[in-house]
C-alpha cells in the first residue's frame, strides 16, 4: 500500500525489465489487468494498481478530477523508480495516462493511450451523442442503480464478452463490482465529461505519445476519440486486438501488440 493525500493505493509489481504501468479503465481494479500483466512480465517490470476508492484502495476524498488520479499515479511512480516509465491505459485509464504525461512529463518515457474518451475533440453531432450517452448512464444509475447503468454503458460502447481468446475465462463479478461501479458513476464519469485534455502541452511533452484503438470498435465514439487525438498529434492511430475492452478479453494479443508498438 502507498499513502497519498486522501487515499491509500494498493499496487502490485511483477516481472523484470523496463517499468510498465498498466492503468485499467471503467470500474475495473488491477485484477482486470492481471492476464495482460502475466503476458508482459517476461519482458517488463509490470506495475498495476487500484484507483483510489476501487477494490483494495481506499479514500477519504474521492477524485473529482482526472488530475487527482494523475497525481496518484505520479506519486506511485516516484515511490518505485527514478526513471521515466512506460505507461499503457485504456478508456478512463488512457485519459489518466495522458493527464500524467501532461502534468508530469519527466516521469513518462512513452504512453500508449487506448481509446481515451476525449469527448471535446469529437465533431458534432458525435460529441452530443457521446455526452448524451454518458449522461444517460448516470441518470440510469440514479434511477435504477449501478448494475442497470453498467449494462447500458456496455451496450452503448458495444462491449462484446464473446470476442475473447479461447483460454480467457468468463469473468465472474467479484464482491467489489457494484461498489466500484458506484465510484465510477458518482465521481469518475462526471470528471470524464468535464475533462479537457491540454493537447498543446501533450505535443510539447518529451514523452512518446501513442494513440490506439480496437480493430472491432470503429463504429463507437471512443474509437473516434482516439482517431481525432491521433490527428491532432499528427501521429498514426495504432490498431489493437478486439474492441474497447480488448485488454480484458484479448490479453495475449494485446501484450504482443503493445510490445511491438513500444519497440517500434
Image (cartoon, helix red, strand yellow):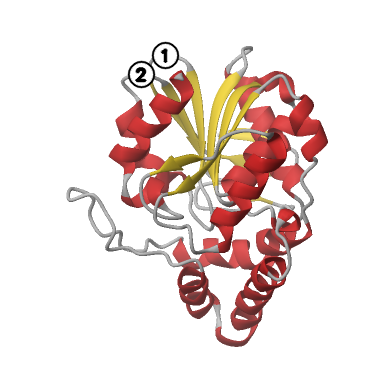
Does residue 88 lie above or below 137 as drawn?
above
What residue sits 29% from the left and 58% below the top?
163
Which residue shows up at 55% across the image and 80% down it?
145
Cβ atoms at labels 2 and 1 below 8 Å apart:
yes
Secondary structure of the residue carrying numbered label 2: loop
Residue on which disc 1 sits: 17
| 228 lies above or below 145 | above
From the top left corner, tell me how far across and down residue 10 is, in percent: 53, 39
State which tag comes first along the sequence, 2 or 1.
Answer: 1
Q: Quadrant of the N terminus?
A: top right
Give 84 or 227, whichever is nearer the viewer.
Answer: 227
105 to the left or right of 22? right
Q: Is residue 225 something one can see in this rendering? A: yes
Q: Please provide percent x and percent y for residue 115.
A: 55, 49
Q: Secondary structure at mark 1?
A: loop
Q: Measuring from the top left, give residue 194's x and y in whole percent.
A: 78, 59
Using the image, determine if residue 144 lies above or below residue 160.
below
Using the image as rendered, state which of residue 20 and residue 200 is in the foreground: 200
Residue identifier under label 2: 43
Residues under labels 2 and 1: Cα distance? 6 Å
Amino acid at each position: 500500500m502507498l499513502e497519498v493525500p486522501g487515499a491509500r493505493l494498493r499496487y502490485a509489481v511483477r516481472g523484470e525489465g523496463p517499468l510498465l504501468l498498466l492503468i485499467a479503465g471503467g470500474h475495473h481494479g488491477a485484477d482486470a489487468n492481471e492476464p495482460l500483466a502475466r503476458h508482459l512480465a517476461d519482458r517488463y517490470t509490470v506495475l498495476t494498481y487500484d484507483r483510489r476508492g476501487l477494490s483494495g484502495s481506499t479514500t477519504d476524498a474521492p477524485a473529482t478530477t482526472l488530475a487527482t488520479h494523475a497525481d496518484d499515479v505520479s506519486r506511485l511512480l516516484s515511490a518505485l523508480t527514478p526513471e521515466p516509465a512506460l505507461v499503457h491505459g485504456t478508456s478512463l485509464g488512457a485519459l489518466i495516462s495522458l493527464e500524467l504525461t501532461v502534468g508530469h512529463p519527466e516521469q513518462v518515457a512513452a504512453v500508449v493511450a487506448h481509446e481515451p474518451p476525449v469527448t471535446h475533440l469529437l465533431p458534432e453531432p458525435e460529441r452530443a451523442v457521446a455526452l448524451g450517452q454518458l449522461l444517460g448512464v448516470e441518470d440510469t444509475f440514479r434511477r435504477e442503480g449501478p448494475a442497470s447503468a453498467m449494462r447500458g454503458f456496455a451496450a452503448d460502447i458495444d462491449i462484446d464478452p464473446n470476442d475473447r481468446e479461447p483460454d480467457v475465462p468468463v469473468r465472474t463479478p467479484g464482491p467489489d463490482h457494484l461498489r466500484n461501479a458506484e465510484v465510477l458513476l458518482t465521481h469518475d464519469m462526471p470528471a470524464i465529461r468535464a475533462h479537457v485534455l491540454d493537447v498543446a502541452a501533450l505535443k510539447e511533452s518529451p514523452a512518446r505519445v501513442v494513440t490506439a484503438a480496437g480493430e472491432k470498435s470503429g463504429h463507437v465514439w471512443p474509437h473516434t476519440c482516439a482517431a481525432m487525438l491521433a490527428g491532432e498529434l499528427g501521429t498514426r492511430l495504432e490498431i489493437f486486438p478486439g474492441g474497447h475492452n480488448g485488454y480484458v478479453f484479448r490479453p495475449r494479443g494485446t501484450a504482443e501488440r503493445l510490445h511491438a508498438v513500444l519497440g517500434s
